[in-house]
Amino acid sequence: MYDDILVPTDGSEEVETAIEHAFELAETYDATVHALYVVDDSRGGAGLMGTETESAVSELRTIGEQAVGTITTRGEETGLTVQAEVRTDLPHEGILDYAEEHDIDLLVMSSRGRSGVSRFVFGSVTERVVRLSERPVLVVSRGTPDENRR
């Protein structure tokens, strides 16, 4: 049913539940896990204000490499095949493009992204992927059930 499962990460601990779901599904279906980190090339409007620098992008790329590296190591330790990539794009577009390029069968994503004004202005990456994806998307809540009721 699922041969390739994509789990996008933002490098935060909150994405852990989505990673666990992706691993469990990959074990069940003998699927390859694809770990993806997308360096946001819009940088939340920072580029518009002239504060975008190569060092900031480089730092985000390093964070991304660490995030997908951790997923790769953990997956391989449990016997899974993991492919990892860091790319630069608008996050939702990078995720959707990767899914298309790699013929992904299922995307597993966390339900909470940015919050507050930033989310209002830019929208949730997960919401955009769900709306625009032609592939199935499993949305996993970040945090505990009690936290999600608030």
Image (spheres, rainbow, N blue to C red):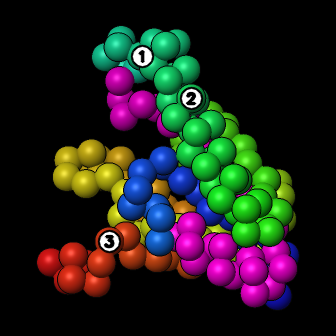
Q: Residue at x 59, y 57 (%)?
A: 8
Q: Residue at x 42, y 31 (%)?
A: 43
Q: Dot 3 surroundings within 10 Å: few (below 14), some, or many (20 or more)?
A: some
Q: Position of residue 28 (x, y in %)?
A: 75, 87
Quadrant in which residue 20 is drawn? bottom right
| Closer mark to the observer between disc 2 and disc 1 | 2
Between 30 and 54, the one lying in front of the other is: 30
Magenta range: 18-46
Q: Dot 1 surroundings within 10 Å: few (below 14), some, or many (20 or more)?
A: some
| Closer mark to the observer between disc 1 and disc 3 | 3
Residue furthest front in the image: 77
Q: Is residue 41 above or below residue 91?
A: above
Q: Which mark is residue 125?
A: none
Left/right placement of residue 116 relative to residue 25 reads left
Q: Is residue 137 visible?
A: no
For label 3, the residue is 143
Q: Which mark is residue 62?
A: 2
Left/right placement of residue 104 relative to residue 6 reads right
- Residue 1 in magenta? no
Q: Is residue 103 above or below residue 43?
A: below
| Amino acid type for the residue under numbered disc 3 | Gly
Q: Is residue 140 visible?
A: yes
Helix, strand or loop at disc 1?
loop
**Disc with the residue nearer the chain's start (2 vs 1):** 1
Question: Which quadrant: the N terminus?
Answer: bottom right
Q: Position of residue 59 (x, y in %)?
A: 50, 23
Labels 1 and 3 touching (C-beta < 8 A): no
Quadrant in which residue 136 is drawn? bottom right
Q: Residue at x 58, y 39 (%)?
A: 66
For label 1, the residue is 52
- Residue 22 in magenta? yes
